[in-house]
Image (spheres, rainbow, N blue to C red):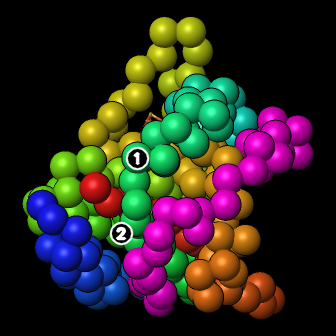
Amino acid sequence: MDLMTKLENAKKVLDYARGLEKVFAVKLIETRDIVVDERVRFQCSHSGCREYGKRLMCPPYVPEVDDFKKVLSNYIMGILISVKGSSEDVFRLAGLLHEAVYSTEKKAFSMGFPFAAGLIGGPCSLCEKCPTGENAKCIKREKARPSMEAMGIDVIKTCKKVGMEIEFKEGEVTWTGLVLLD
Ligand code: SF4
């Protein structure tokens, strides 16, 4: 696919994502605007995240930040997707973001992006209990995706850089994910 066709198809994928449940913002971005910072990953292990080591799509089970940077360098664009709602719905909204990222990735694949890759926000919570441990295998491998944060992406800075600033308001929660396109 030439660059112009890629761009046209990416806009169609963007329109698709915009129409999904609870999605309030989407943006087609250049991957050079994605801010990757090792400190984000460091926070996973050192800020007391309760899910660290307990979810197979979370560190330390996912690729290292440097490996992700190499993968990222092969993409030129991606779609940021945010869902927003009441903080009382925080887990349901996280699930809706996961659905939105997953289905947008599938849509992108069907539109000629064979390397479409989705990243969710926060820990994968498709299963109540994640079977971690030495030989543990993901139960829903087809649908499970790691988060932007797990890959070392500074979500707040990235959103700010592309003019999709995340507002923090009491009683409200925003989850943001990304679908890389190529
Ligand atoms: S799909 Fe289930 S088993 Fe796989 S990472 Fe997510 S919670 Fe864990």
Q: Circle 2 is placed at which residue position?
A: 100
Between 166 and 96, the one lying in front of the other is 166
Q: Position of residue 23 (x, y in %)?
A: 42, 84
Figure quadrant of the C terminus: bottom left
- Horizontal side of 57 relative to 180 (left or right) equals right
> Amino acid type of disc 2?
Ala
Q: CA distance from mark 1 to mark 2?
A: 23 Å
* Image location (x, y in percent) of residue 124: 51, 47
Q: Is residue 13 visible?
A: no
Q: Kindly indicate the quadrant of the structure image that contains residue 134.
A: top right
Q: State the SS at label 1.
A: loop
* Crowd class of label 1 (few under 14; some 14 to 19; many from 20; radius 10 Å): few
Q: Over which residues does the magenta segment extend?
A: 23-50
Examine the rendered structure and indicate whether residue 136 appears above or below residue 45.
above
The residue at 41%/71% (across/down) is 79
Query: Is residue 116 rendered to the left or right of residue 46?
Result: left
Q: Position of residue 14 (x, y in %)?
A: 30, 80
- Number of residue marks: 2
Q: Which residue is painted at 40% across and 60% down in the image?
A: 76
The response on whether ligand 1 sits within 8 Å of label 2 is no
Q: Is residue 161 visible?
A: yes
80, above or below 163, in the image: above
Q: Can you tell which mark lies on residue 102?
A: none
Residue 103 located left or right of residue 59: left
Of the two numbered discs 1 and 2 on the same chain, state the one appearing first in sequence.
1
Specify whether residue 153 is painted magenta: no
Whether residues under marks 1 and 2 lie with C-beta atoms below 8 angstroms apart, the answer is no
Q: Is residue 37 magenta?
A: yes
Which residue is disc 1 drawn over? 74
